[in-house]
Image: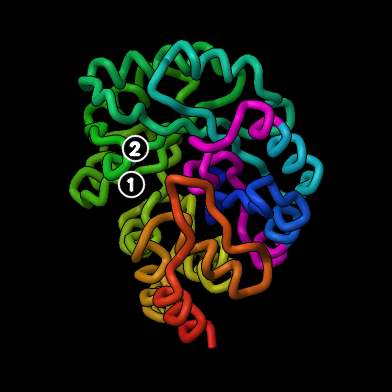
Amino acid sequence: MLKNTLRGTGVALVTPFKNQEIDFPALGKLIDFVIENGVNYVVTLGTTGETPTLSATEKKDIIAFTYEHVNNRVPVIVGIGGNDTKSVCSDLEKFDLSKATAVLSASPYYNKPTQEGLFLHYKTLAAASPLPLLLYNVPGRTGRNMTAGTTIKLANEVPNIVGIKEASDDMNQCMELLRDCPKEFLIVSGDDALTLPQLACGFDGVISVAANCFPKAFSSMVQHALNGELIEARKLHYNLLEGYNLLFKENNPAGVKGFLHALGILKNELRLPLTPATEQLMVSIRKYLS
C-alpha cells in the first residue's frame, strides 16, 4: 500500500545550477546527503526544483539522473503539473515514469478554476497517469484553494488518486481530510513549520523543503512524531523553528539554496525571475548553522 511506502519524510529536491546549467554532480551530492541522513523518499521536479524555468529536455535529463543516482535506495516521486490539463496529460505520456513510485501534481495556477474545474482536471490526469497520482494543494502559490470537499470527492470517486500533499495552512481543513478521506488515502504535509501539529493530528508524513538542508534532524522529528514520541519530536521542532523562518524569509528556493551553499553542497544560483538569497540573509543562515 502506497500509504505505507510513502510514510515519513519526503524531500522536494532543489535543482542545482552552475553557470545557469544544471549541475548534475551537485545534484548527486544532494541526493546522497538526504538519503544518508534519513529521508524516506525523494521528489524530483517539484516546484522547489524551479520547474517553471526548466525545459522539457532538462526535466527528462533530471528524471533519468535521479533514477540512476538514487539506484533504488528510496522511492522516487516525479512532479508533473501545470495549468493546462491537456499539456499535463501529454507530459504524463512522454516522461519516463518506469522507475517512479507515484506522480505528484500541483493544482493549476493563475487561471483559478472552480472546484468543479479542479475535480475534472485531476480526474482527467488520473485517467492519463500510468502511476498512482498524488494531489498537491498549495493555494499560496496557485491562487486557488482546493477545498476539503473536493479532495474527499476525488479520494472516494477516482481510484488512481491515492493521496495529497496538503499546504493550505488551514488546520480545520486538514482535520476534515483526516476525518472524511478513506483510511488508505495518504495525507502528507506541505508546510515544514506545521508538520509536527499535523502529524499529531494524524498526517502520514511530509514532503519537505527543510529536509534538503536539515535531513537528519527533520527526518528524526517526523519519525518521533509518527511513533507517538511527541516530547522528543517537540524538542527537534523548536530547534528547527528559526531554520524554517530563514528558509522562507525571501523566497523558495532561495533560502534552501542559501543553506545548501553554506553547507558546501551547491552553488548559490537560481534562474530568473528568482534571485539568490541576499547577503543579509546569508549572514543569518551562517549564524544559524554555526
The local secondary structure at tag 1 comes to loop
Circles 2 and 1, Cβ within 8 Å, touching? The answer is: yes
Mark 1 neighbour density, 10 Å: few (under 14) some (14–19) many (20 or more): many
Position of 271 compared to 193: left or right? Answer: right
Give the quadrant of the C terminus: bottom right
Which residue is denoted by mark 2 in the rendering?
137
Task: Tell me the kind of residue under disc 1.
Answer: Ala
Q: As rendered, which of 197 and 110 lies closer to the eye?
A: 110
User: Where residue 247 sits in the image (x, y, percent)?
Assistant: 42, 65
Q: Residue at x 62, y 54 (%)?
A: 40
Give the labeled residue for mark 1.
167
Q: Secondary structure at mark 2?
A: strand
Asked if one can make out residue 10 in the rendered structure from this viewpoint, the answer is no
Per the model, the C-alpha gap separating discs 2 and 1 is 6 Å
Q: Is residue 284 left or right of residue 143?
A: right
Q: Residue at x 50, y 19 (%)?
A: 88
Q: Residue furthest front?
A: 19
